[in-house]
């Protein structure tokens, strides 16, 4: 399974939904709390093309986007193939 990175904050409901969806699929993700570490927020902004909202989700090197984008991939049946190693 590819590495999954979730930039989030401690109080974000959409972050919790994204993490719940990933967990329900058995995905072990790395979480970066950008409200705790400002330098990681700068990293998130750079990697996401300037997006300031959380969550910002990466699967491997691909920027998925936020929770709505992740959920759309799941509904379209595209999330499982994306998570798998080639």
Image (tube, rainbow, N blue to C red):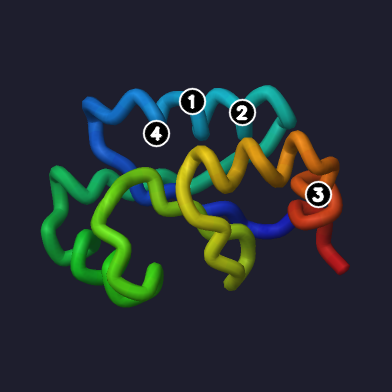
The reply to whether callout 1 and callout 2 are in contact (CB within 8 Å) is yes
The reply to whether callout 4 and callout 1 are in contact (CB within 8 Å) is yes
Q: Which residue is identified by label 4? A: 15
Image coords of residue 15 (percent x, y): 39, 33
Badge 3 or badge 4: first in the primary sequence? 4
Badge 4 or badge 2: first in the primary sequence? 4
Badge 1 or badge 3: first in the primary sequence? 1
Name the foreground residue: 41 vs 50: 50
Q: Residue at x 22, y 26 (%)?
A: 11
State which quadrant residue 43 falls in.
Answer: bottom left
Q: Which residue is identified by label 2? A: 21
The reply to whether callout 4 and callout 2 are in contact (CB within 8 Å) is no
Q: Which residue is identified by label 1? A: 17
Disc sitting over residue 78 in the figure: 3
Disc 3 to disc 4, C-alpha distance: 20 Å
Secondary structure found at label 3: loop
In this picture, residue 4 sits left or right of residue 9: right
In this picture, residue 56 sits left or right of residue 58: left
Q: Residue at x 38, y 45 (%)?
A: 55
Which quadrant, please, contains the C terminus?
A: bottom right
Secondary structure found at label 4: helix
In this picture, residue 29 sits left or right of residue 11: right
Disc sitting over residue 27 in the figure: none
């Amino acid at each position: 399974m590819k590495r999954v990175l979730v930039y989030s904050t401690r109080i974000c409901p959409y972050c919790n939904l994204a993490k719940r969806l990933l967990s329900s699929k058995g995905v072990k993700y790395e979480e970066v709390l950008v409200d705790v570490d400002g330098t990681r927020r700068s990293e998130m902004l750079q990697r996401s093309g300037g997006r300031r909202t959380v969550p910002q989700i990466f699967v491997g090197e691909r920027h998925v986007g936020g929770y709505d984008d992740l959920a759309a991939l799941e509904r379209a049946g595209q999330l499982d193939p994306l998570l798998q190693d080639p």
